[in-house]
Image: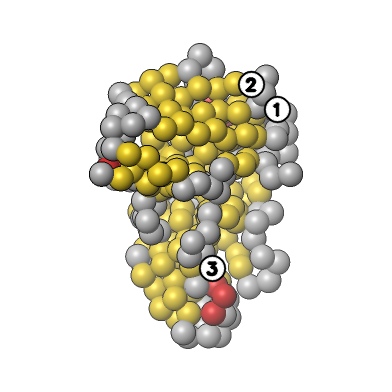
């Protein structure tokens, strides 16, 4: 059972380009979280999704950022017109449906995508 | 007030010693609690869940105090490899708007020295 898979592991973009970060959850997991971590800082919540539904996007910047988790395929975090301040590590985590009970809320992280904007 | 707060440390611990630290949470309607460990520039890894009755996993002991709204982690017989940042995670229950959402503390840094 493969863990959470994120790709690419490293991504370099020029200012103004688009960045697409992919996250394939663990098999059987229906919920996906995206977090951003700046150097020397903690994890900042961005968005929480289940398939075909955004549950909570309160941590997403209002502009340029979007996320989706389609019925088929990985979750995508999309950053349009990247700026230097978007350079960070972006981590994805997945879990079973928390509604199933507390035993099912353990979340597992992917290795992250390190985005560098030059 | 932050939803989840931790002492950032660092806690400098001699090898073989015991270290303990807490994490406080603001939402009394929280259902699940975890400790994660994060090594420099790597992904957080689940260390252990925290159960109401407290639980132990080898040298690690976790406790939950619902009345005072904090969880704790104790590490006995510290090893050099225990050096890391320990992240507290709280998940609110279904009575809140934030149910299911992992809420992270900023982390407590532990440095074990020879």
Q: Residue at x 72, y 39 (%)?
A: B97
What residue is shown at x 50% (from left), y 46% (from top)? B9
- The residue labelled by disc 3 is A78
Judge the density around disc 2: few (<14), some (14-19), many (≥20) Cα neighbours within 10 Å. some
Q: Which residue is mark 1?
A: B28
Task: Rate crowding at label 1 as few (under 14), some (14 to 19) or many (20 or more) other CA atoms within 10 Å.
Answer: few
SS state under label 1: loop
User: Looking at the image, is B51 positioned above or below residue A27?
Assistant: above
Secondary structure of the residue carrying numbered label 3: strand
Dot 2 or dot 1, earlier in sequence: 1
Provide the residue designation for mark 2.
B66
| Chain assignment, label 1 | B
Question: Which residue appears at 45% of the width and 43% of the height?
Answer: B11
Task: Tell me if label 2 and label 1 are in contact, CB under 8 Å.
Answer: yes
* Residue B8: % across, % down: 53, 47
Determine if residue B7 is in view.
yes
Side of A111 where B5 appears, left or right: right
């Amino acid at each position: 059972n493969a863990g959470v898979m994120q790709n690419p592991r490293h991504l370099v973009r020029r200012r103004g380009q688009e960045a697409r970060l992919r996250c394939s959850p663990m098999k059987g997991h229906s919920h996906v979280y995206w977090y951003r971590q700046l150097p020397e800082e903690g994890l900042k919540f961005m968005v929480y999704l289940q398939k075909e539904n955004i549950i909570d996007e309160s941590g997403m910047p209002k502009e340029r950022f979007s996320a989706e988790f389609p019925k088929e395929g990985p979750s995508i975090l999309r950053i349009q017109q990247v700026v230097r301040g978007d350079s960070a590590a972006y981590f994805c985590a997945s879990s079973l449906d928390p509604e199933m009970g507390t035993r099912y809320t353990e979340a597992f992280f992917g290795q992250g995508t390190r985005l560098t904007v030059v | 007030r932050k939803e989840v707060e931790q002492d950032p440390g660092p806690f400098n611990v001699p090898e073989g010693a015991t270290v303990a630290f807490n994490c406080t949470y603001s939402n009394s309607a929280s259902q699940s609690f975890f400790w994660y460990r994060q090594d420099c520039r790597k992904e957080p890894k689940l260390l252990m869940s925290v159960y109401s009755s407290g639980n132990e996993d080898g040298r690690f002991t976790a406790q939950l105090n619902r009345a005072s709204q904090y969880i704790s982690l104790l590490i006995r017989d510290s090893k050099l490899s225990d050096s890391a940042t320990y992240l507290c995670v709280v998940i609110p229950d279904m009575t809140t708007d934030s149910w299911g959402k992992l809420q992270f503390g900023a982390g407590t840094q532990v440095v074990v020295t020879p």
